């Protein structure tokens, strides 16, 4: 069963933005693994991480913000019934081609209005068996890369069985240490964020 979180608004090989109704915001989580088809037959899809979620305003929101008393029913009507758009920004970290997980930028972006779905636990587990996507995240421009990588690893760890979760995070920490040996302050920050409880 798929978990659709929106549709592609704009895209490039580096990433894409996804739009949805405000009622879908609970499933648009910072660090979540998402996918969108880049082949019409579904054999190739881009895999990315949500790195930002934005809620646009409209003229009514601007008026309500200036009001002293806003009733609960007005708030709920604004959030649930009005067409308040939510945008999730995604950075691409790989793609799946005919069942093979590849840790590189996808060959082309998804088309506008393509569905964007949360990756399944099985897809996340398969994709995160290797740590090759770490470099794409750490080097991504205009992305809170350290916090994003940590959030993605914590998110991914829940796709692992309980007895594998700790070892997975330790393996990730070792790979991050290799990549950030030249920047000990940054390394310390990322390791603190993914430290197993």
Image (cartoon, grey):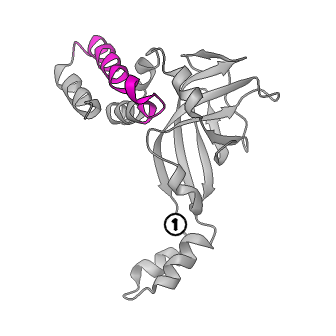
Residue drawn at x 65%, y 41% as measured from the top left: 116
Which quadrant: the N terminus? top right
In the rendering, at what x and y percent does residue 145 appear? 37, 31
Q: In the rendered structure, which segment of residues is drawn in magenta?
A: 155-182
**Residue 75 part of the magenta segment:** no
Relative to 1, is 78 on the left or the right? left
Residue drawn at x 52%, y 61% as measured from the top left: 56
Q: Is residue 106 something that shows in the picture?
A: no
Q: Is residue 168 something that shows in the picture?
A: yes
Residue drawn at x 62%, y 54% as measured from the top left: 20
- Label 1 packing within 10 angstroms: few (<14), some (14-19), many (20+): few
Q: Relative to the observer, which residue lies in front, 5 or 110?
A: 5
Residue drawn at x 76%, y 23% as measured from the top left: 43
Q: Quadrant of residue 139?
A: top left
In the figure, 112 relative to 141: above or below?
below
Q: Which residue is mark 1?
A: 57
């Amino acid at each position: 069963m798929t978990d659709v979180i929106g549709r592609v608004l704009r895209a490039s090989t580096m990433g894409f933005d996804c739009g949805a109704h405000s009622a879908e915001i609970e499933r648009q989580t910072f660090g979540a693994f998402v996918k969108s088809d880049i082949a019409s037959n579904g054999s190739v899809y881009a895999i990315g991480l949500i790195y930002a979620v934005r809620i646009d305003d409209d003229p009514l929101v601007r008026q309500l913000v200036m009001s002293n008393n806003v009733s609960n029913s007005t708030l709920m009507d604004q959030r649930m019934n009005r067409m308040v758009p939510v945008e999730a920004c995604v950075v691409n970290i790989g793609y799946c081609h005919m069942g093979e997980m590849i840790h590189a930028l996808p060959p082309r972006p998804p088309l506008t209005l393509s569905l964007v779905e949360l990756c399944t636990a099985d897809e996340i587990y398969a994709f995160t068996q290797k740590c090759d996507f770490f470099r794409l995240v750490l080097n991504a421009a205009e992305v809170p890369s350290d916090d994003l990588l940590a959030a993605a690893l914590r998110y991914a760890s829940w796709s692992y069985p309980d007895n594998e979760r700790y070892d997975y995070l330790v393996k990730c920490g070792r790979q991050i240490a290799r990549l950030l040996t030249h920047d000990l302050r940054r390394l310390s920050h990322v390791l603190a964020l993914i430290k197993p409880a």
